[in-house]
């Protein structure tokens, strides 16, 4: 829905409405929360980890800013290097602050677990790749091929359908039979192949032969990553950490997308500028140069997914290891609850949730001529 709605708003109103419409969704969510979610406050209100929040936000901002500045200032510029180094230092300070905090924003015990850590890495890498797919293919279809915003959203639907099918089959059937290692590693490999297929697109390439096959493969691959990774990231987590473990899944995907878009945009635009410098100008030179930048970004994304394949094999548990973790956790879950006074509130029943994620974003390009759209980027 996001792809189609984003295309409709951009084509018939303005790209700004893709931002304004979120206010409507937020208003509906607030109204629903007020109407159906009852008040629930803990007996002891934990303190907000302000140092951790400031360090984490500041570190991520500086890393994204540093990658973005590399486009105009260059990779060796003091502002670029300083931002990247300062971002890493702040994230290091965040780790130290979380170790010392009595109420950490991110308890490190959640991510130092090898199984959960591997799942978060898989979500982070897939976030880089899927946002890159949406962004650069949107540019290619609209700026180079001249498709409208609405038509571009519709052209992405085969990929979304494959994600739906693959994620549900992976969660319901594949995870219990194969384990997360096989599924996520295979998904990384499939996605890398689909991304590599996109590196061959040219100005004259057609959608059916050069784009659609890659979208189908990418959809199947991403679906094999999302559902198993989310299941594994929240599997066996302590009840007190269930909220942060679930929230960290979405956080890793969004952080991966932010860092990936900033870094890959810089790579793509650098490749485009290099092509224009070394080749004679002509009527098709801007389009050829832009397409070359997109293919370089797809090539880097394929390499990142290849790294994800290796990390998935190293970090994630297989079917047997997952069964051992489940068996070890069973006695603790089956232990009798301690006696409590009649006035004490009854504990909430524990559920084993099996979430399925479907990531779909809608990066859209303002309807304009190719030259204007290229300049806006």
Image: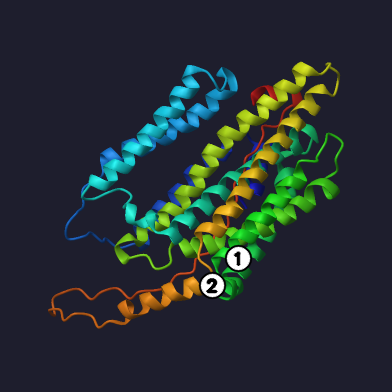
Q: Quadrant of residue 350?
A: bottom left
| Residue sitting at x 58%, y 44% | 128
Q: Is residue 95 above or below residue 224?
A: above
Quadrant where the C terminus lies?
Answer: top right
| The one of 120 and 358 positioned closer to us in this rendering | 120
Q: Is residue 84 above or below residue 195?
A: above
Measured as percent of width and height from the top left, residue 56 is found at 36, 39
Q: Is 329 placed left or right of 223 in the picture?
A: left
Q: Secondary structure at mark 1?
A: helix
Label 1 Cα crowd, 10 Å radius (few <14 / some 14-19 / many 20+): many
Q: CA distance from mark 1 to mark 2?
A: 9 Å
Q: Which mark is residue 319?
A: 2
Q: Are marks 1 and 2 in contact (CB under 8 Å)?
A: yes
Q: Is 102 placed left or right of 231 in the picture?
A: left
| Residue sitting at x 59%, y 47% | 361
Q: Which mark is residue 182?
A: 1
- Is residue 160 at all visible to an observer of this figure? no
Seen from this angle, which residue lies furthest front? 314
Q: Is residue 351 above or below residue 135?
A: below
Measured as percent of width and height from the top left, residue 209 is found at 85, 49
Q: Which mark is residue 219?
A: none
| The one of 147 and 313 positioned closer to us in this rendering | 313
| Residue sitting at x 80%, y 28% | 288
| The one of 164 and 220 positioned closer to us in this rendering | 220
């Amino acid at each position: 829905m996001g792809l189609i709605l984003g295309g409709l708003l951009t084509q018939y109103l303005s790209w700004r409405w893709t931002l304004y419409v979120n206010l409507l969704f937020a208003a509906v969510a607030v109204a629903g929360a007020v109407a159906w979610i009852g008040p629930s406050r803990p007996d002891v209100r934990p303190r907000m980890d302000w140092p951790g929040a400031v360090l984490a936000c500041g570190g991520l901002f500086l890393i994204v800013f540093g990658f973005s500045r590399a486009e105009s200032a260059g990779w060796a510029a003091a502002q670029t290097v300083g931002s990247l180094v300062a971002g890493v230092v702040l994230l290091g300070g965040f780790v130290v602050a979380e170790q010392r905090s009595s109420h950490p924003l991110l308890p490190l015990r959640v991510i130092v677990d090898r199984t959960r850590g591997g799942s978060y890495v898989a979500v982070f890498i897939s976030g880089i790749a899927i946002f890159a797919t949406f962004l650069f293919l949107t540019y290619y279809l609209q700026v180079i091929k001249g498709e409208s915003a609405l038509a571009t959203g519709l052209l992405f639907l085969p990929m979304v359908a494959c994600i739906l099918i693959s994620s549900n089959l992976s969660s319901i059937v594949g995870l219990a039979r194969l384990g997360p290692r096989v599924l996520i590693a295979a998904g990384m490999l499939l996605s890398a192949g689909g991304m590599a297929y996109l590196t061959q697109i040219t100005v004259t390439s057609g959608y059916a032969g050069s784009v659609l096959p890659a979208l189908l493969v990418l959809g199947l691959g991403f679906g094999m990553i999302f559902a198993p990774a989310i299941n594994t990231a929240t599997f066996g987590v302590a009840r007190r950490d269930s909220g942060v473990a679930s929230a960290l899944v979405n956080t890793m995907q969004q952080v991966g997308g932010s860092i990936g878009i900033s870094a890959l945009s810089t790579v793509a635009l650098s490749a485009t500028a290099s092509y224009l410098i070394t080749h004679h100008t002509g009527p098709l030179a801007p389009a050829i140069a832009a397409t070359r930048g997109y293919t370089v970004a797809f090539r880097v994304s394929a390499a990142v997914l290849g790294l994800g394949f290796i990390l998935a094999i190293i970090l994630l548990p297989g079917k047997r290891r997952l069964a051992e973790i489940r068996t070890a956790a069973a006695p603790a879950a089956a232990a009798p609850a301690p006696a409590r006074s009649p006035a004490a509130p009854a504990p909430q029943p524990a559920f084993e949730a099996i979430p399925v994620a479907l990531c779909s974003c809608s990066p859209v390009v303002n309807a304009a001529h190719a030259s204007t759209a290229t300049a806006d980027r």
